[in-house]
Amino acid sequence: MTLRSSISLALILAMGLTACATDEYGRSRPLTNTEAGAIIGAVGGAVAGAAINHKNRGKGALIGAVGGGLAGGLVGNYMDSQAKDLNKVLAPEVQQGSIQITKVGEHNLRVTMTNATAFATNSYAIKPGFYPVMDKIAKVLNTYGKTTLEIEGHTDNVGSDASNQTLSENRANAVQDYLLTRQVAPERLQAYGRGETQPRASNDTEAGRSQNRRVEILIEPVVQN
């Protein structure tokens, strides 16, 4: 990513933040001094980060936008604490099987949402009944802002490759869009559709296909170089 691209990203972020300034009735209102300062800081941080990190300006802009990356020695405790909070607030959903929280590698986390709970069949609209769960996830993600979030949609192998790819992309985008409405910073988010290419179980049985129909959020720490 070029410095110009990083600056453009920062400006887009600023415009997105200004759009969030509303009163308790959802009407647009002027920014307060504190809000304006936060936007200026986010933009300045993103640009400064891009200028400092010459080898990887994309990551540099991200580090600046999230207020600095984590020092290596602090990553483990930070991610362990986040996992603890996710497991605490999502305990009912984990027990019901609608959410799975797993550790990936040394420090990353994966939150998996099942198709049956989050989406209707062949639909990419999040079920309204799942909004409270999404709100709890977003609250923890906002508490631990020094992370990136890769949202991946997955399907079983029923239907054509093309339709499954499109459905997986739309579901990932739906989760991303919802998190944006809950003020999760856009520079932290990326959404992908994997279609039927990464099954977790055999597609020969309905039980296996059910496991394959899912959306996953991979949570990775932003580490300072």
Image (cartoon, helix red, strand yellow):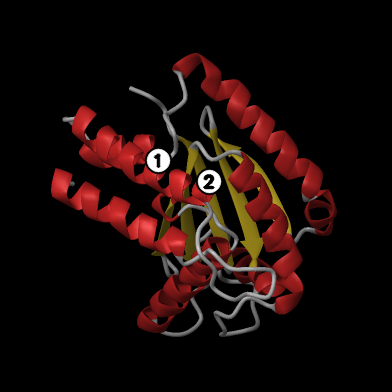
The amino acid beneath tag 1 is Gly
- Sort mark 1 into few (<14), some (14-19) or many (20+) by Cα contacts within 10 Å: some
**Does 122 appear above or below 199?**
below
162 left or right of 220? Answer: left
Q: Which residue, as the protein is rendered here, is positioned at the far top?
A: 73
Q: Earlier in the sequence, mark 2 or mark 1?
A: 2
In depth, the one of 97 and 69 nearer the eye is 69
- Name the residue at 71% across, 69% down: 131
Q: Quadrant of residue 23?
A: bottom right
Q: Are marks 2 and 1 in contact (CB under 8 Å)?
A: no
- Name the residue at 26% across, 40% down: 47
Disc 2 marks which residue?
34
In depth, the one of 58 and 192 nearer the eye is 58
- Name the residue at 16% across, 43% down: 3
Regarding mark 1 in the picture, which secondary structure is present there? Answer: helix
In depth, the one of 12 and 112 nearer the eye is 12
Pair 2/1: label in front: 2
In depth, the one of 66 and 125 nearer the eye is 66
**Does 30 appear above or below 56?**
below
Picture coordinates of residue 146, whole percent (x, y): 50, 36
The amino acid beneath tag 2 is Thr
- Sort mark 2 into few (<14), some (14-19) or many (20+) by Cα contacts within 10 Å: few
Disc 1 marks which residue?
41
129 left or right of 32? Answer: right
- Mark count: 2
**Does 185 appear above or below 82?**
below
Picture coordinates of residue 225, whole percent (x, y): 33, 22
Regarding mark 2 in the picture, which secondary structure is present there? Answer: helix
| Label annotation for residue 3 | none
Picture coordinates of residue 56, whole percent (x, y): 21, 35
